[in-house]
Image (cartoon, rainbow, N blue to C red):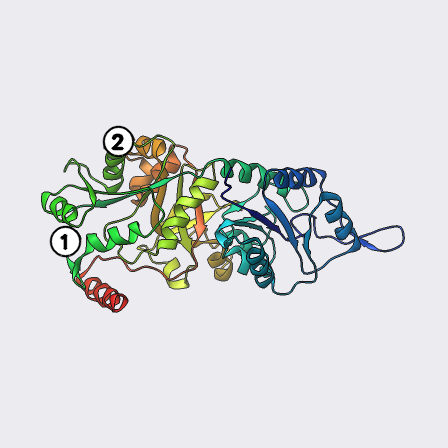
Amino acid sequence: MTHRYKLLALDIDGVLTDGKLHYGPSGEETKVFHVKDGAAIKELMSRGVEVCWITARGADSVKIRAKELGVKRLHMGVKDKLSVLKKIIKEMKISLEQVCYAGDHLMDLPCMEKVGLAFSPADAIAKVRDKAHIATKAKGGEGVVDEIATILLDTNKKKQDFHIVIPARFASQRLPGKPLIKLAGKTMIEWVYLKAKATKAANVIIATDDDKILKTCENFGADTILTDPSLTSGTDRVAAACTQRGLAPDDIVVNLQGDEPLMPVEAIELVARNLEHNTGAAISTLCTAITAAELVDPNVVKVVKDNRGFALYFSRSPIPFDRDGNQDLQQKVAARHLGIYGYRIEALKTLAQTPPTMIEKLESLEQLRAMDIGFKIHVSAWSGPLPIGVDTQDDVNQVGKILGKQEG
């Protein structure tokens, strides 16, 4: 079997152990390892996934435990973990996309940002949990690797395909016929399509309500579906497209808005990958750090999530409520929501068939309908530049210049 992931790299303190100082009978420093993690490491290696340990500190007990488990790649006293990891993958002749990394410290962030799949223990600091694709239920030293192995071996059985559907509506209050607006020589919908095609999606489909858009898209070779003009939202159009193409209920689809020609490829793939790995989620989306001005702006949607990355609530109001006037803390807890979504298709169809709920109507936020009917939404942190959507003529001018420079 060809595995998707070839290497699991681990920090030791805070992941394999609880990070606390323990001393043996002679006063030597020791580490306490969870027995389930040892069994999981042996299972991974027996199934073709190599395991390496990279730590800033070390102890004789670490060397002993590595030898017991057959872990040959042990690197202690490391200051630049990413450099060590790059040397390892060069020796193994694999890419960073084939690496999983589990860490809990700021020193682990450079590695976590580069690998194909990043884990953090439940008790890692917030900055590290935000960068992780998955935060485990277990705390450091309490079976983190056992939990990772279960996910990893299941993932390696079959890489789940994902699809992209681009809803493109002709009617727009501020910019009628928006998908057909020319930006640096191409229509906006073609730019969005090209961005989607640059991802690893199995299929890219455009769902429109207009014959002109349909013909334009077919002319540049896009798989395009004409949907019922009475559908009121992009979500409805995406669901209709999935039905028409007969996509499986457990498949993943990313809703890429037709007015987002600058959406980074990495952001699109992050939404799909995180939904694939967070099996308890029905929907995935992104967030980024929020400024003080954005916190009070009703046009900026805020999200608060739990320590495993699942949304607790979305709002146009500042959340959570700042009772004691600690705005710095409020900004650390809240995040700015980015409106790109991944869905399990069965959940998407249920959402599209459910009438708007009261809480959704109050906030005018469709994702609250999903939460109201019990769907879990996984929210990943996006640290890249914020893409500019096209809503006004000023946006058209600005985005056109950016695309023109990229083409040049």
Question: x and y percent of residue 187 in the render?
Answer: 17, 56
Residue kind at label 1, given as amino acid type: Leu
Q: Which mark is residue 243?
A: 2
**Badge 1 element:** helix
**Mark 1, other Cα within 10 Å: few <14 / some 14–19 / many ≥20:** some
Q: Is residue 109 visible?
A: no
* Residue beneath the point at 32% across and 59% down: 387
Q: Earlier in the sequence, mark 2 or mark 1?
A: 1
Task: Give the label on residue 180, or none.
Answer: 1
Q: Are marks 2 and 1 in contact (CB under 8 Å)?
A: no
Q: Nearer the viewer, residue 66 or 276?
A: 66
| Residue 120 locus on image (x, y percent) | 57, 49
**Numbered mark located on residue 149 in the image:** none
In the image, taking residue 241 as reference, residue 104 lies left or right, namely right
- Which of the 4 image quadrants contains residue 367? top left
| Front one among 262 and 287 | 262
Is 210 left, or right, of 49 in this rendering? left
Image coordinates of residue 403 in percent, x first then y, are: 25, 64
Residue 205 against residue 388 in the figure, above or below: above
